[in-house]
Amino acid sequence: MRHHPSRVGLITLSSRQGLGRALEYHKMAYEELRRYNIELLPLSDVITSVDDLHKALEGFRLGSMDCLIVLVSSMVSEELLRPLMLKDIPVLIWDVGDPGLISTASSLQLKGLLRRIHAKYGFIYGRPREGRVASHVASFVRASKGYVSLHSARVGVLGDLKKGSSHPDALEKFLKHFGIEFVKIETTSLKRYVEGVVEDELRGISQELHERGIKVSASPPMMLHSLKLYLAIRRLAYEKKLDALLFDCRRGLSDYGTLCLASSLLWEDGFPIDCYADLYGLMTAMMAFFTTGHVVFSGFISNVEVHDRIIRILSCGGAPISMAPDPRNVLISNQRSDWGKGVSLSFSVKRSRVTLLRLMEGEDSLALLIASGESFPVPRERLREDVEIWPHLFLKLDGNPQRLLSELDDGKVHVILGDHRRDFVGLARLCELKSLLI
């Protein structure tokens, strides 16, 4: 339930001789970046002295920002660069490339200083209104937001998860790598939250689904219980200040019924959730959401048409409703009896450019697999080829499906709308992950 526009500090460095042109570059950068839903906090118009820089950085540290952009508009002294050797937040060096003011010499010098202390940094070359320069800057800002959000996240672990990627050893590994705080929550506490749901809240959610045109064929008792679970987890997450939740729906929470509708609605609220006890899956979903603000379709690859590069991905009952072509295409049915008591959503994802992701174990480090393609909706008849009552995502992959299959170490993948490959390559670099671009 945490997503806000990227908050960025903007500093422009200049010599006194280049002050006039630096003011122009500063104004252009400010205007260009505001088009990308970035909350810019100019710490000073243009900085030419060490004293002014220290004052600006004091204000910077007091605020909550995702990264610092240093616009280098001319050659400056090393004395003016050294205070920017920050390790606790990503720094983007933006060299305007002005040959008359020799900006590149100082921007490369700053890059060397940051590299020496193993800081998190990026480097962009070009003037603010030149080509896609501002777009590349915005991409680094999004990656920085994902990195900072991950390193301050509180993840709820509901129930006793000791299998697979959610073994306590794995939790400890992610704690060390990302600094994530894991909050243990007993399943018995969920029952208390379910019992605390009031009728007015239930009527409000039911009415909202009806007004959106979502079709419901599920039995009323199943529907009612699913909505109670949604409201209960939403309140639990709010009171415990959680940014995401991990649990095992089919095992640790089987007495509560499936949480497919609850998961779908929580994603609509902007709350990452994984019901497979898949820590790698939840981390992937958190990376995707914290970086872009887009909801995530999490599912398993069920079929690959290699020649046509078509990937079919199924979720076992839940997916964000906003990914459907229209809410009126969504059908809520009783879940399969062999899967558990509850309800399931059914639709195929709308047409869009998409990004596919999966965080995995690499040979010597964690790796982030990144692929792209185009999703497309299909007639409901196609859904009957496997499990009609589950959400489907049909994807025409840009890359080679054989390579995708050879790199994946798990059938579960995560897809967001939009082409964000550059964002995630940047995020992988900031998080010290290997990026595998398909």
Image (spheres, rainbow, N blue to C red):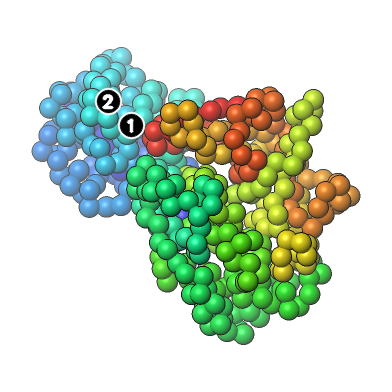
Q: Is residue 156 above or below residue 423?
A: below
Residue highlighted by disc 1? 121
Tell me how far mark 2 sits from mark 1, CA to CA: 8 Å
Mark 2 vs 1: CB contact within 8 A: yes
Q: For the residue labelled by badge 2, is the local secondary structure a helix, a strand or a loop?
A: helix
Upstream in the sequence, badge 2 or badge 1? 2
Q: Could one spot residue 250 in this view of the protein?
A: yes
| Mark 2 neighbour density, 10 Å: few (under 14) some (14–19) many (20 or more) | few
Query: Residue 372: percent from the left, percent from the top?
Result: 63, 33
Q: Could one spot residue 5 in this view of the protein?
A: no
Choose between 74 and 120: the one closer to the eye. 120
State the residue lying farthest toward the bottom. 199
State the residue lying farthest toward the left. 51
Query: Residue 100: percent from the left, percent from the top?
Result: 28, 15
Q: Which mark is residue 115?
A: 2
Query: Residue 255: percent from the left, percent from the top?
Result: 63, 71
State the residue lying farthest toward the front. 162
Choose between 91 and 19: the one closer to the eye. 91
Image quarter of residue 231 = bottom right
**Residue drawn at x 33%, y 41% as measured from the top left:** 67
Q: Say left or right for 75 vs 273.
A: left
Give the amino acid at mark 2: Arg
**Residue drawn at x 32%, y 34% as measured from the top left:** 120
Choose between 206 and 301: the one closer to the eye. 301
Q: For the residue labelled by badge 1, is the local secondary structure a helix, a strand or a loop?
A: strand
Quadrant where the C terminus sits is top right
Count of numbered marks? 2
